[in-house]
Amino acid sequence: MLRMLLSSILLALGFREAEAQGKGPNTTIPVQKDPNRHEEFLKVAKAGGVDLLFVGDSITDGWRGGGKAVWDKTFGPFKPANFGIGGDRTEHVIWRMRNGELEGIQPKLVVLMIGTNNGDPAPDVALGVKTILQDIHERVPKAKFLLLGIFPRSEKPDGARKKNEEVNILISKFAGDLSLGRVSYMDIGAKFLAADGTTLPKDIMPDFLHPNEKGYQIWADAIIEKVKQLMTEDSGKPLPSFSPPSPVAKVAKIEESIAAGKLDAGTKALEKLKEDKDAKTAEAAKADLAAIEKWKTSVDAEIARLKETGDVVLAADICTAMSTTYTGDAAKPYKDQSEELKKDPAYKVGKEYQKLQAHPAEQRKDPRFVKLVEAFLKKNPEGYYAKAAQALISGK
């Protein structure tokens, strides 16, 4: 427990320090690898038409091999693309995302699993995963994420598997962090293990790392309903996430109702259960109430950060969304904030900037687009949106 607490502290401090200094551990510093595969993905992105994007290493890449039949049957109807490369670590994915693999596509959902190839400490690997989420969110802000815990490896628990489990605990905290986008987290690792809960069967992962067709079927079955939900539901409501679900059945059911958009009713139900005679039920309800409060605090902090940096449009959008998440008196402060932000002169500038941002990446080198940006900058030479507009044509 102490080790995990220290890891969480290091993760938070490490990321803030990396942001402040413009650098970080190796897991966050982009490194090029496999240029030929990268070129293949650039062609896929340029062709467009991708609604579901898988990103990862050889385990994801394997959907083209042992998992192909399962992939075609399960995910084929969702206009999928597979951007997995064998041997990739977090730093390789960061390089790829920053070098064009998202230009030309606007996926509705990104399924991400990465980190098993990183030999770095768990907090550093988690920082790498966080950087990938941020990079993708900046480039395709409307996309949702299904972040998967790293799968178990080795026949029996060893150092590598235990390190990955530490990473999974850390990255599970990214769910609900709006600065990273709309992130849902699932750890399906237990579904690959034998009945003893520790042994990784050879008939699922023959080399104790990569799934065979049976393993890919387990993976597909475990996430397909969540994939369908995330790709079809778009209420626009920010909602807290509970990872893993509560082991108390009645509390887990309330969590499901909250995930479906019934936050007020779910909170009231949890308030009643925190007085339940069953100690485990009461404690589970209290834990969920604390998680909801922590989530709300993080949303408020993100709104404040956006207002401070000058992105009043996104701040207003989040406030508007939160005013639909809550009802009654709880919704009023968010509605008031949204209306106030929309009166800010920068809001109109931001809406103009969004029209520029909507141009596909391949059009941004066109002289006509450059002139549009220059005209925008002439009218709005300073501020957050001026810097953002300049970056559209400078590539920075």
Image (cartoon, rainbow, N blue to C red):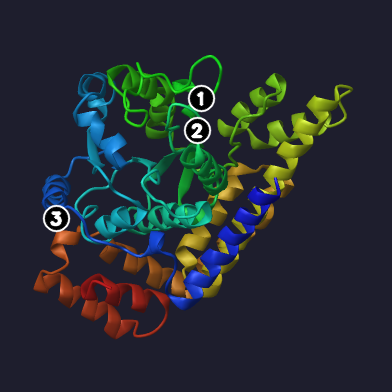
Left or right: 302 as drawn, with respect to 69: right
For mark 1, what is the residue?
190
Q: Considering the image in quadrants, where does the C terminus appear?
A: bottom left
Q: What is the distance, in whole Å, between disc 1 and disc 3 at their CAs? A: 35 Å
**Residue 289 vs residue 42, the one in the foreground:** 42
For marks 1 and 3 on the same chain, the one whose residue lies earlier in the sequence: 3
Front residue of 71/233: it is 71
Element carrying mark 3: helix
Find residue 301 and report its horizontal and vertical position in percent.
62, 62
The circle drawn on residue 170 is: none
**In what element is the residue under mark 2?**
loop
Taking 347 as reference, is 80 above or below it?
A: above
Question: Taking 244 as reference, is 82 left or right?
Answer: left
Q: Which residue is mark 2?
A: 187
Which one is in front in this view, the residue at disc 2 or the one at disc 1? 1
Q: Which residue is found at the position 83% from the left and 32% from the top?
A: 274
**Residue 77's x, y, as percent?**
24, 25
